[in-house]
Amino acid sequence: MKIIYWTGTGNTERMAKLIGEGVKEKGIEIEILNVSMDTINSDTIKDDSCIVLGCPSMGDEELEIGEFLPMLDSIREELKGKKIALFGSYGWGDGEWMRNWEEEMRSEGNNIILDPLIVNYEPEGENASQCIEYGRKIADIIK
């Protein structure tokens, strides 16, 4: 299983690591990849049955267009048939970017296994616990 994310301020990276903790607690091996630092393409995910994707809200409540969207476009075909979960952080708005992303992924025939997880700013306290629990839920679904 892979967790693939892009982060600008570090908040989405923190979410990825916390989600990873929850997955690992259930005994599932994961690899956490940062879009800015790791090479990610269709070959990267071809052997995984579950992919967790994370991107914060940018600009006018949209996905990051410089690195994340090109990466996502490069793996769209390979995502079909896989279990997918979405997450991200935001600093303003009401989560519209995530609702739009989920709707787009579903309209392409992707299997979104859980409601997306969004956190306002940095995941701390209860929000950090929600990230860990999200990872546990993902692990329970794919076991």
Image (cartoon, rainbow, N blue to C red):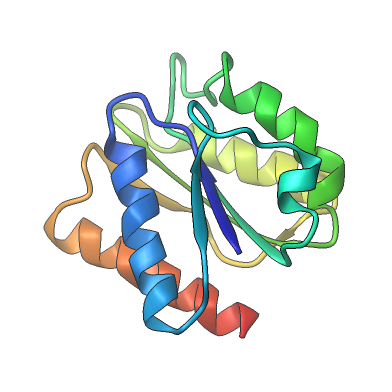
Which quadrant does the N terminus fall into? Answer: bottom right
Q: Is residue 96 above or below residue 59?
A: below
Q: Horizontal and vertical percent for residue 90?
A: 34, 33
x, y percentage for residue 24? 41, 74
Residue under the point 37% across and 80% down: 25
Camera-side residue of 127 and 35: 35
Q: Residue furthest left?
A: 125
Q: Quadrant of residue 13?
A: top left
Q: Position of residue 10 (x, y in %)?
A: 28, 33
Position of residue 43 relative to residue 100, above or below, is below
Image position of 3 (left or right of 75): left
Q: Which quadrant is home to the C terminus?
A: bottom right
- Expressed as whole percent of the image width and height from the top left, the position of residue 134 reads 41, 67
Query: What residue is at 49 percent from the left and 34 percent from the top?
Result: 96
Query: Considering depth in this image, is 121 or 19 the residue closer to the camera?
Result: 19
Numbered label tally: 0
- Point 40% across, 63% down: residue: 20
Does 109 sit left or right of 24 as displayed? right
**Position above or below: 69 against 60:** below
- Left or right of 46 on screen, residue 44: left
